[in-house]
Structures are given as structure tokens and as C-alpha cells.
Image (spheres, coloured by chain):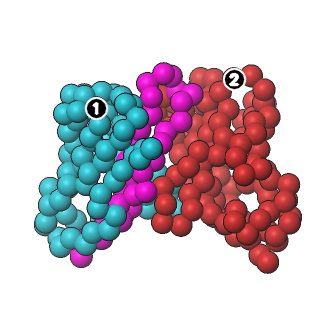
Amino acid sequence: AQSVTQLGSHVSVSEGALVLLRCNYSSSVPPYLFWYVQYPNQGLQLLLKYTTGATLVKGINGFEAEFKKSETSFHLTKPSAHMSDAAEYFCAVSDSNYQLIWGAGTKLIIKP
Amino acid sequence: NAGVTQTPKFRILKIGQSMTLQCAQDMNHNYMYWYRQDPGMGLKLIYYSVGAGITDKGEVPNGYNVSRSTTEDFPLRLELAAPSQTSVYFCASRSEQGGNQPQHFGDGTRLSIL
């Protein structure tokens, strides 16, 4: 069965520093992988997705993620954090029935 | 574009009461989903639908019911509210063309059972 593990329920970085949010997955089929962002009191919004092809995927707001099959990872990065990036981030993998299996989420805290 | 619209945004229920959470989408998506979100737990799938008249259970269906009479609407019914159903509920939809299509979310309904 598919599963998603997000390392760290909270990640704190200084404004301007590198953001790295970790996601590891298990999947018995070639995975479709997603990162979503949730701002306070809002729904989830797609940041980026990996389906096939290029393993480095660029998303909105300067975020990108790299699919590494050998490491079963799909970590999310941003070179320079902004205060507006403070939110909760969710990684998800699509299973063989195209349902999404979700990680528990990581809250990103930006220190001024 | 309205996208996915959920009503109400907030609700407080007493134990044993019933209510329906409404969800409507205007993107002509066949696939629709209901999730609950509890702190630190990610999203859990309650029910889903692949088209009008077709629904199926997700991971945590107990205590809930759904119907799908139209493509646009996918209401979620709580029959006998229990404190364990205090949560944030999200409705989502996606087009049917394969697992690489993202889900689109509403803003959620925050439900407290007291």
C-alpha cells in the first residue's frame, strides 16, 4: 500500500534562508506526486506535481521539487524564504485507483 | 470562476443533531471527494464519487452519508453528531483524466460538536 512520510511536523527558517521540506513515499506503481499548500483558514492549493518526464518540477511562488526514484523522495525547496510562505505544506501520492494518499503535513514558520 | 464552494464555513452542533455539509463545483468535474482534517493527521478520505449516482466509501466513512444526484453537487450528511466528528471538512473535485490531474479544494467547513 502507498504511504507518505513528511519529516518534521514543524520547520522553522529565517527570512531569506533556504526552505527544505522533506517527503518520502512508498508506492507499488509509478507514482504521481503532489505538493499542496494550505494558508490559515483556507483550503489546499496545488503548488506543483510530478507525473512523468523531467524530475525537477517547478511550481508556483518560487518552489520546486525533485523526484528521486532511488531515494523514493520528493522534497520541496525554495532558495529564499519570504514571510508570505508561512503555511502548512502537504505531500501526496496518487495510488493505483487515483486516490491521493496524504502526508501529515509540515508547518513552515518564517522567522523575521 | 467559483471553483469548489462549501457551505457553511462554520457550524456548532450539539451531540445527536444532524446536518448536511454542502459542496458544489462549477468545473464539470466527475470526481468529487470529502475529506476530514484533524491536527497533525493530514487528510482522511470519507467518501468519494466518480460521477452522478455513483459513490463509494473512503478510509473513514462511519457516521457519514453522501449522495450525488448531479455532477455539480456532493453533499455530506452527519446523522447523529458525535464529539469525534469535530473537525475541518474539505470537499474537492478533479477531472477524470487520470491520476495526474490535481484535486481542487473548497475553503472548508469548520465543525464543532459539543
Q: Position of residue A39 (x, y in %)?
A: 57, 62
Query: Measuring 86% from the left and 64% from the top, which residue is drawn there?
Result: A17
- Give the mark toward the camera: 2 or 1: 1
Question: How many numbered callouts?
Answer: 2
Direction from residue B10 to residue B16 in the image, left or right = left
Q: Quadrant of residue A108?
A: bottom right
Subunit of label 2: A
Direction from residue A81 to residue B85 in the image, left or right = left
> Is the residue at mark 2 from the same chain as the one at mark 1?
no
For label 1, the SS is loop
Residue under label 2: A52
B49 to B39, vertically: above or below: above
Subunit of label 1: B
The colour applied to the residues of chain B in this rendering is cyan
Query: Measuring 39% from the left and 58% from the top, which residue is drawn there?
Result: B108
Q: Quadrant of residue A19?
A: bottom right
> What span is in magenta?
B88-114
Query: Measuring 60% from the left and 60% from the top, which residue is drawn there?
Result: A88
| Chain identifier for the red-coloured part of the image | A
Direction from residue B35 to residue A105 in the image, left or right = right
Residue A9 counted in the magenta span? no
Q: CA distance from mark 2 to mark 1?
A: 30 Å
The front one of B20 and B63 is B20
Give me the disc on residue A51. Answer: none
Q: Position of residue B8 (x, y in %)?
A: 29, 61
Indicate the amino acid at tag 1: Thr
Residue under label 1: B71
Q: Quadrant of residue B10?
A: bottom left
The front one of B39 and B21 is B21
